[in-house]
Amino acid sequence: MDILKKASLLTAEFISLSADKVQEVADEFVKKGTLHDNEAKKFVSEVRSNLEGREKEFTERWEQVVNSVQQIGTTLGITKVEKDNLDERIDELERHIDELKSRRDLLNKELGKDGGASKAKAASAASAK
């Protein structure tokens, strides 16, 4: 998935969570009697509109950034296919790094499970010589 789509999805998710949180707070104020139901609805509506406007603004800015980066890449002689291949390779390397970290963690757990008995055996064998 390209960076623009990821940024857009992330922004939409953030806005959705923010709007949901605003709704929760407004509902609490209504329960406590701090706000009337109509005031809370109006407030939530205004906040949602504001957030949606910011989502558009953010998406437009991301598009500008992505376009600028693509232009720089084109200027440097990097094609979209080459960029996609590099992105794919980076993803592959990141997965490999994660796999190696998992293996390392597993080995560390296995080595630590015997409570150092192997080390003690090795030390006593070395001192017996």
Image (spheres, rainbow, N blue to C red):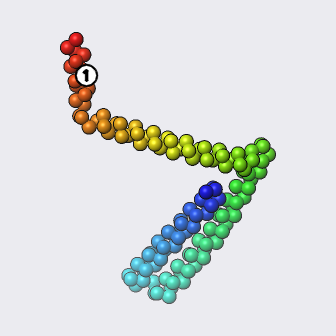
**Residue beneath label 1, please?**
122
Q: Nearer the viewer, residue 56 or 40?
A: 56
User: Which three-letter amino acid code belongs to the residue tagged 1?
Assistant: Ala
Residue drawn 25% across and 31% down? Answer: 116
Q: Nearer the viewer, residue 30 or 75?
A: 75
> 10 Å neighbourhood of mark 1: few (<14), some, or many (≥20)?
few
Asked where in the image residue 50 lies, by quadrant, the reply is bottom right
Instruction: Indicate whether 39 appears above or below 8.
Output: below
**Which quadrant is the N terminus positioned in?**
bottom right
Residue drawn 40% across and 39% down? Answer: 103
Name the spot of residue 47 as percent of width and height, x first.
56, 75
Q: Furthest-right residue in view?
A: 75
Q: Furthest-top residue in view?
A: 129
Instruction: Indicate whether 109 appears above or below 70.
Output: above
Asked where in the image residue 112 lies, by quadrant, the reply is top left
Name the spot of residue 30 as percent of width and height, x first.
42, 83
**Which quadrant is the C terminus positioned in?**
top left
Check disc 1 and report its element: helix, strand or loop. Answer: helix
Asked where in the image residue 67 lies, by quadrant, the reply is bottom right
Name the spot of residue 8 as percent of width and height, x first.
61, 63
- Figure disc tally: 1
Q: Nearer the viewer, residue 23 or 81?
A: 81
Name the spot of residue 93 as percent of width and height, x first.
55, 42
Residue drawn 22% across and 25% down? Answer: 120
Q: Is residue 3 left or right of residue 125?
A: right
Residue drawn 65% across and 59% down? Answer: 4
